């Protein structure tokens, strides 16, 4: 079995939260759940906007496996065999956006959710920040060769009656990737008897950035509303859902690998001290979720809470295992990108996690407007999820 050794200096250079833009539309089956105000003669559509947690980053993987050989025990969806030799083509999952790094996967939640619309458009891009959402005329920035996502939305709205818009943004503005890098470096560069922990410094960093990041979430919502108004759609003619982020790792007490030794790095791909993992799971993720929920409420948008979605299915959780079986992990473990896949996929929902969120999104779309939490059901796959009103 080849090891996934997390060389700290390599992580610094390659584990950047992704970056890139490109709109991909996909046909769906008719129907709809919008209100009045749109042009009912146009085909209906659902649109996703935002960053890597909604674009489909990590969707190449259906579980994790520490070996770099073959199809990684069935977890690598980009693997194929030809004349007895294994090849890998991530474009089989990410399509044209494999080349620019937006990584819009074929299992992104907007693609797998049960939505009664004619077309689906995934405009999200891995690595995007709030300014990549705004219209160019209002300070929006191009990203990876693509126009600001609000301007792309305007193009969709000119030819479709948009019934659902889902937004995930703010994580990159908060420096979530930097926090992961810092915590992983701390684990890999200190012994268990003299731990170099990250939580205090990273909590201070997050606190310092929170107000600005949430202002960006709020402005993103305003920009979306302005685009839809210009397209002739009133706020009650479509649903605008803002979602939070799931925790990719469990609490420190729920790791199946000891803090001592190299199993968390080389095998599990979860190089975090217990105290840092517990902070991330029980403090950081809920803090971000609560703040996003507050912005959504203030702007009249619906909220989908994903903070507990991966409970028991996180990377290295005692209740999950490597492989692609029924108890597979729903997040992508941390890799350098030298052994398998790309570093930017690390700590994102994998194919199973994306399908799980898609299941909740479909349930939410068929439910009354409001705020909901998405939770998994013990012993069930991503096609069986529990959506609860909050």
Image (cartoon, grey):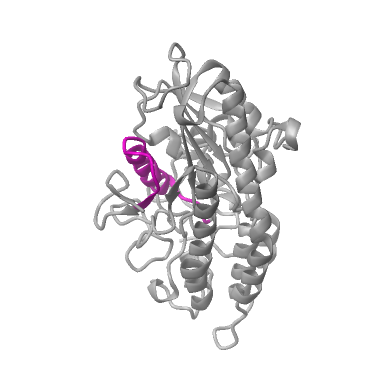
The structure residue drawn at horizontal position 50% and vertical position 66%, both measured from the top left corner, is 270
Quadrant placement of the N terminus: bottom left
Tell me if I can see residue 40 in this picture.
yes
- Residue 363 lies in the magenta stretch: yes
Q: Nearer the viewer, residue 41 or 20?
A: 41
Q: Say left or right for 217 vs 139.
A: left
Q: Position of residue 304 (x, y in %)?
A: 43, 48
Residue 383 in the image: above or below residue 322: above
The structure residue drawn at horizontal position 35% and vertical position 37%, both measured from the top left corner, is 362
Q: Position of residue 10 (x, y in %)?
A: 68, 60
Q: Where, by quadrant of the figure, is residue 226 drawn?
A: top right
Q: Where, by quadrant of the figure, is residue 310 drawn?
A: bottom left
- Residue 250 lies in the magenta stretch: no
Q: Position of residue 208 (x, y in %)?
A: 69, 65
Residue 157 in the image: above or below residue 138: above
Q: Say left or right for 381 vs 109.
A: left
Residue 68 in the image: above or below residue 28: below
Residue range highlighted in magenta: 347-374
Judged from this view, the residue extending furthest toward the bottom is: 193
Tell me if I can see residue 269 in this picture.
no
The structure residue drawn at horizontal position 47% and vertical position 73%, both measured from the top left corner, is 278
Q: Say left or right for 297 vs 216.
A: left
Q: Position of residue 271 (x, y in %)?
A: 53, 69
């Amino acid at each position: 079995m080849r090891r996934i050794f997390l060389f700290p200096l390599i992580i610094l250079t390659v584990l950047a939260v992704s970056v890139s833009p490109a709109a991909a539309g996909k046909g769906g089956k008719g129907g709809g759940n919008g209100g009045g105000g749109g042009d009912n003669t146009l085909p209906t559509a659902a649109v996703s906007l935002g960053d890597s947690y909604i674009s489909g980053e990590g969707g190449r993987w259906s579980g994790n496996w520490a070996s770099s050989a073959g199809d990684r025990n069935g977890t690598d969806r980009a693997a194929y065999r030809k004349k007895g030799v294994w090849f890998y083509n991530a474009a089989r999952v990410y399509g044209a956006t494999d080349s620019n790094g937006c990584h819009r996967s074929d299992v992104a939640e907007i693609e797998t959710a049960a939505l009664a619309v004619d077309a689906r458009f995934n405009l999200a891009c891995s690595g995007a920040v709030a300014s990549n959402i705004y219209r160019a005329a209002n300070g929006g920035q191009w990203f990876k060769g693509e126009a600001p996502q609000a301007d792309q939305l305007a193009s969709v709205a000119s030819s479709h009656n948009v019934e659902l818009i889902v937004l995930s943004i703010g994580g990159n503005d908060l420096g979530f990737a930097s926090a992961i890098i810092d915590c992983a470096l701390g684990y890999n560069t200190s012994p268990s008897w003299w731990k170099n922990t990250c939580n205090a410094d990273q909590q201070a960093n997050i606190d310092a950035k929170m107000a600005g990041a949430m202002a960006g979430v709020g402005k993103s919502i305003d920009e979306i509303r302005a685009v839809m108004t210009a397209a002739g759609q009133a706020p009650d003619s479509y649903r605008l859902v803002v979602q939070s982020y799931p925790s990719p790792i469990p609490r420190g007490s729920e790791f199946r690998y000891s803090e001592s030794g190299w199993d968390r790095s080389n095998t599990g791909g979860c190089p975090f001290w217990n105290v840092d993992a517990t902070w991330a799971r029980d403090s950081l993720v809920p803090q971000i979720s609560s703040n996003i929920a507050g912005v959504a409420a203030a702007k009249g948008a619906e909220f989908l809470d994903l903070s507990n979605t991966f409970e028991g299915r996180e990377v290295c959780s005692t209740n999950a295992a490597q492989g692609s079986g029924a108890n597979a992990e729903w997040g992508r473990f941390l890799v350098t990108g030298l052994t398998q896949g790309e570093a930017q996929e690390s700590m994102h929902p994998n194919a199973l996690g994306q399908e799980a969120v898609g299941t909740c999104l479909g349930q939410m779309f068929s439910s009354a407007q409001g705020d909901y939490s998405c939770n998994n059901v013990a012993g069930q796959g991503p096609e069986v999820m529990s959506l609860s009103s909050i």
